Image: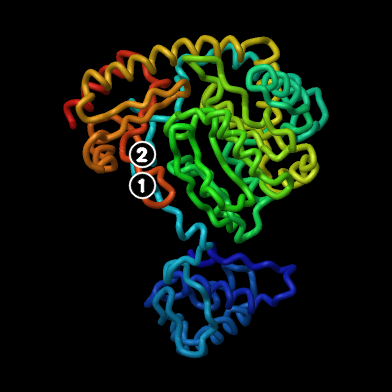
């Protein structure tokens, strides 16, 4: 029924004839009223819409003059134009079905680096980037959520970044990671990626130079490119990200020094000091992403780069999705003191606000000791799983893959000893139920390394063994 597609506003300054004409024209232009379609008579449509017959007659006459309708005395008007087309001299009306959508330069360059990253549930071995949600103390977490919900009914609106959680995080980060920060420097965000988006929005002017690791975390390059930065990839050696000798420091440097993504390499103290000494305070900012810094197995964890910085130029980014469960959707950002006020305003304007209900529950989860108890248990579990995967790779696939054993984390890299067909290998493995990621897909520009990124934290040893047997049969 055509009248159901029309919405006339009697209080609008634009007359009813103009409204009806415009809406009918739009319906024809997008193809809702197709060529050859007979419209209701003016009497019938006027009755359905609750307007005078003259209003409908005048609208039909205008559309006939523009070439949208063919009208003759005693007959119902008929649409004469295909959707998206218009007759010469008619008013232009955009069609959502014709032409190419106009996107921003950043969005136009978006691409899926390797198709299996469009992951479908459920998880399959050996998908990287995940902890084992099956081992999470869901009953304890549920009690924290319930108590938070009860308290929420009794409290007034509080700050966007909940004080209790910020204080708990400040204490935890100081004791476990050597981060130097007061509670008011910590911002609670929906994810670590949200932290990168916020940093880019506040600091990056189009054309600014930004350095990222290559290969590295693709979300970082995406966030900075979205703000118009000129992103350059810095190659890696055994100590992690390298500087180009003689090159002036950029506006911003993104790095994962405690556990480089994806290689798992630890940036040496000498290299950390080199980056800090060459970064001009107030001119060059460093973003340290400590995405899985809770998990170290073979030695004491190295303190965060942020704790070595005497000039407040390092942003520290973290997430709870690896240590707890991926659907908690909480990350955090430690902001240099001089920028706290600006970042708090920007956080509100952009809308990167995390649920206060979840924040309060997490504060209780940490304060009652559940978070540290869970971490201690998972470190032991993930350590054993890493060793099991390394041993299995060497036994089943040692002739084809060389393993770089990380000191910590939840995933590792196995490089191809021959050839470069890592993306083809990933596709074959997905077809038989094993999910990995191609190392070459993480390159910023031209790949330098070829191999597979394999997750071990989310998978029990029996599942890892089965996946390795499947891999061996495919290679």
Q: Residue at x 68, y 50 (%)?
A: 203
Locate residue 45 relative to residue 451 in the image: left or right: right
Rendering coords of residue 298 (x, y %): 47, 14
Rendering coords of residue 379 (x, y %): 49, 14
Q: Residue at x 50, y 70 (%)?
A: 27
Please identify the residue farthest to the front as the structure is shown. Answer: 246
> Looking at the image, is 167 positioned above or below residue 22?
above
Does the image show residue 220? yes
SS assignment at label 1: loop
Does the image show residue 149? no
Residue 180 occupies quadrant: top right
Q: Which mark is residue 447?
A: 1
Residue density around tag 2, few if under 14, some if 14–19, many if 20 or more, within 10 Å: many
State which quarter of the image contains the C terminus: top left
Q: Which residue is mark 2?
A: 439
Please identify the residue farthest to the right as the structure is shown. Answer: 156
> Looking at the image, is 475 positioned above or below residue 21?
above
Q: Nearer the viewer, residue 136 or 475?
A: 475
């Amino acid at each position: 029924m055509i009248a159901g597609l029309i919405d006339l506003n009697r209080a609008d300054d634009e007359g009813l004839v103009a409204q009806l004409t415009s809406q009918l024209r739009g319906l024809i232009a997008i193809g809702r009223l197709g060529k050859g379609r007979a419209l209701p008579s003016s009497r019938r449509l006027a009755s359905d819409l609750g307007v005078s017959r003259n209003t409908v007659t005048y609208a039909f006459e205008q559309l006939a003059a523009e070439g949208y309708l063919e009208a003759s005395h005693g007959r119902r008007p008929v649409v004469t134009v295909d959707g998206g087309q218009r007759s010469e001299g008619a008013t232009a009306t955009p069609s959502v079905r014709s032409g190419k959508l106009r996107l921003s330069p950043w969005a136009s360059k978006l691409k899926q680096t390797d198709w299996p990253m469009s992951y479908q549930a459920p998880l399959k071995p050996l998908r990287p980037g995940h902890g084992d949600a099956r081992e999470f103390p869901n009953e304890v977490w549920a009690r924290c959520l319930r108590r938070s919900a009860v308290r929420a009914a009794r409290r007034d609106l509080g700050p966007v970044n909940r004080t209790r959680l910020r204080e708990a995080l400040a204490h935890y980060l100081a004791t476990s990671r050597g981060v130097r920060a007061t509670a008011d420097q910590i911002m609670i965000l929906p994810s670590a990626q949200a932290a990168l988006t916020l940093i880019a929005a506040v600091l990056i002017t189009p054309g600014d130079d930004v350095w990222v690791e290559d290969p590295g975390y693709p979300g970082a390059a995406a966030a900075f490119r979205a703000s118009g930065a000129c992103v350059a990839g810095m190659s890696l050696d055994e100590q992690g990200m390298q500087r180009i000798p003689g090159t002036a420091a950029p506006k911003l440097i993104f790095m994962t020094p405690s556990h480089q993504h994806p290689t798992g390499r630890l940036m040496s103290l000498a290299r950390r000091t080199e980056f800090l000494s060459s970064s001009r305070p107030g001119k060059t900012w460093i973003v340290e992403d400590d995405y899985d810094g809770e998990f170290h197995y073979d030695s004491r964890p190295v303190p965060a780069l942020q704790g070595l910085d005497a000039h407040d130029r390092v942003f520290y980014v973290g997430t709870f999705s690896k240590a707890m469960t991926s659907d908690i959707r909480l990350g955090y950002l430690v902001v240099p003191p001089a920028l706290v006020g600006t970042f708090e305003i920007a956080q509100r304007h952009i809308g990167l606000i995390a649920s206060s209900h979840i924040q309060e529950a997490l504060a209780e989860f940490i304060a009652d000791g559940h978070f540290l108890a869970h971490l201690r248990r998972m470190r032991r579990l993930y350590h054993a799983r890493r060793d099991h995967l390394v041993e299995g790779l060497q036994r089943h696939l040692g002739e084809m893959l060389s393993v770089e054993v990380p000191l910590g984390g939840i995933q590792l890299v196995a490089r191809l000893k021959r050839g470069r067909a890592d993306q083809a290998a990933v596709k074959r493995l997905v077809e038989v139920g094993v999910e990995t990621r191609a190392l070459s897909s993480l390159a910023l520009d031209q790949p330098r390394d070829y191999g597979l990124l394999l997750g071990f934290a989310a998978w029990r040893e029996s599942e890892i063994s089965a996946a390795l047997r499947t891999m061996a049969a495919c290679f």
